Image: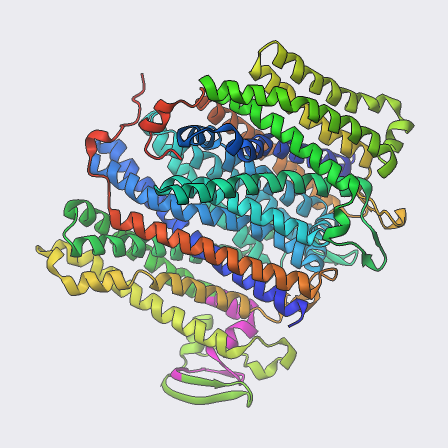
Amino acid sequence: MDVLALSRLQFAVTTMFHFIFVPLTLGLSVLTAWFETGYVRTGDETYLRMAKFWGKLFLINFALGVVTGITQEFQFGMNWAEYSRYVGDIFGAPLAIEATAAFFLESVFIGLWIFGWNKISKTTHAIAIWLVAIGTNLSALWILLANGWMQRPVGFILRNGRAEMNDFMAVVTNPYGWFKFLHTVTSGYMVAAFFVMGIAAWHLLRKNEVDFFTRSFKTAAMFGLLSGLAVGVTGDFHAVEIAKVQPTKFAAMESVWETGRRVPMHLLLVPDEANERNGVETLSIPAMVSMLAFHDPDAEIRGLKSFPKDERPPVLPVFLSFRLMVGLGTLMIGLCLLAVIMPRWKHFVNFKLFLGVMVAALPLPYLAVQLGWLVAELGRQPWVVYGVLKTASGVSSSVSVVQVAGSLLGFTLLYGLLGAIDIFLLVKYAKKGPDNDTTGMIPVKEVA
Amino acid sequence: MELQITWFILWAVLWAAYFILDGFVLGTGFLSSMLAKNDTEKRLLLNAVGPVWDGNEVWLLTAGGATFAAFPTTYALMFSYLYTALLLLLFSLIVRGVSFEFRGKMEGQAWKQGWDRAITISSFLPALLFGVAFGNIFAGLPMDAAGYHGGLLSLLNPYGILTGLLFVCLFAVHGALYTAVKTVGELSGRAFRLAKLLWMPLLLVAVIFLGATAYATKLYDNYLAAPVLFLVPGVAVLALIMVQAYMIANKPLRAFAASCITILFVVFTGVTGLFPNMIPSSLDPAYSLTIYNSSSSQYTLTIMTVVALIFVPIVILYKIWVYRIFRAPVTVQDLTENREAY
């Protein structure tokens, strides 16, 4: 493999690993804040125990999310120096703003939250975790505005041999970035919802702390259903935006080769990239792809064959990832609906099959968000900045194969080790359940 | 004032803020095995930095982000040329952060000893590597039209290692003083004595560094052109002497403050000499990266100035507020009262 292939692989490995921890951080910070707010409002100690238990898991997860985020900022310069030089004038801004306006917020107030239990009033303590939640979500906004710019570059001109920003507001209001942000954070909320429901269901199957885990489950189910619907709606708008501004990605997502109107969706489809057609096309819904793309059955869809071969993304992985993501999303919304309804019945904790399914469903949203990123990033190829700069032109020219192979190996080993330890600790603390020794709980200081 | 100059100063301030704030965390980290005699003392050290280390590390990301946004060419070349050194730095910072969080999550001697070792190494390496990196930037990197002609080994030249040693000594005294201020009793006393002990080597390294800089770099050119600038290293040396004066007077908090000023002015000493270069070329000045040939457009610099003027003061305000909440030294009582403590 050459420097380009290795650098791409390293970016994929480090970014996908980073995104194992980020979505849970996005959602579990909100849920933990919600539970602690419940405690502040009602004084109910179960809420406090919920904030502490889920907060503990949040922290174990958060640790890896933070440290692997440093890699993200460094490797643009390390591995993608030509990219950084070419677009830094415009791409650097959202990254710098993310550090100043969002990352500080979450990092400073997470310290206050962890170490402030006996030092600040309970209201201030709850505000601290809300600020962490706001910080992580704002952080996602700036990162996704940066990514949105790579997908749909706006607000710049090519001048002095590089892309220079000439309209900051266009970058900040880029609809592509906003759809991506809304779609991504709500899918992060789903990860957190299934995480809480899965662990709660595991304990309910064993009749541990039934009240504690039933309440956790109910809150997470409602959170999951609402965010699941939001994921669907924002996904739909996002797809329209993609069809409009990234026709090659859209065509690959649906594996459309020929340009035409009233393009049908084939429920069973096997792309045949070598022959520029689909091997199998059956179970068709008429005009459905046109409908999805432009909310208009008569809309014209540009097929992949209307683009030069060297401007098409790899069709099979994009197509499969998209299909699987949508399928999983639909399944999960269904599960959330059940999860909202089921606990209303008596003997809910005896529905062993359902609880077992919810335990097994815990990894599903993790899989779905990774697939979503594969669609987003593979679907943009061969461009690193869509229509402006090819990925191959962005790689560092001064870095050698040995260096990148070494760093890729290093990242794989280090991340593998740390990931294993993190999951081990998550499982340990998830199984241990909440502290039930309430006498040992130190309530937060009351305001004098 | 030209925006490039504004951003050059801000760039220096961000690095200085990072070195001051993470410097004591790194110093405390790599001295922790030496300072702590048992697990409780080790925990006291970790909990002394616990509430603030994460927020302090963000100054590095802000410095990196500011380099990217304001001087993209410098960002691109600095990070790709120093690839292997930065990779080691990155691995260290990753391991350090995780060690802080995970050490207390399980009982067992092997588990804790493993993380203790990780903390020592992953705190020492960044201190050394930042010094080596900045030493090489002060001296210039071998770059010309064909690109970069160095590697990890070429960074480990005598001046690079000397600067690395300077950073290690600076952060060691800084961290020991922080520990002296933020703990009580025997541990605090031990840290204070260690700071006193380390001050002499620090002074020695600093003097050698100031001398070697005349031979290994062109930093003094700016000073000779405008001798009033010698005030900058002058303040650095004075602050370093004040560290010792306050230690003799048994005032650890003031000694720590003097140590902060020392680090600030050490950074300023370097960048004053660099100006207007960001990374000089050691082969041909025509290929040096300056604040002019590597900066963003005026438009981007203007936007970023507005952003910095709004957010940096807000960040400083809430950081001061949080530091005030945790101003009291960490005691054994804190460890038992708060179950979430490290």
Q: Residue furthest left?
A: A346
In the rendered image, the vertical position of residue A99 relative to residue A265, given as above or below: above
Magenta stretch, residue numbers: A239-268
Question: Residue A293: where, in percent of width, then height?
Answer: 46, 72
> Which image quadrant: the C terminus of chain B?
top left
Residue plotted at (58% across, 61% down): A408
State left or right for residue B118 relative to residue A77. Answer: left
Closest to the observer: B99 or A337?
B99
**Identity of the residue drawn at 49% across and 79% down:** A316
Point out residue B88 in the picture as x, y percentages from the top left corner: 62, 49
Among the 4 quarters of the image, the one containing residue A321: bottom left
- Name the one closer to the observer, A263 or A61: A61
Q: Position of residue B301 (x, y in %)?
A: 70, 42
Would you say residue B137 is visible in this rendering?
A: no
Residue A257 included in the magenta stretch of the image: yes
Q: Residue furthest top?
A: B249
Q: Is residue A63 magenta?
A: no
Of residues A28 and A248, the one drawn nearer to the viewer in this rendering: A28
Is residue B245 left or right of A371 when viewed as pictured?
right
Q: Position of residue A175 (x, y in %)?
A: 52, 57
Q: Quadrant of the N terminus of chain B?
A: top right
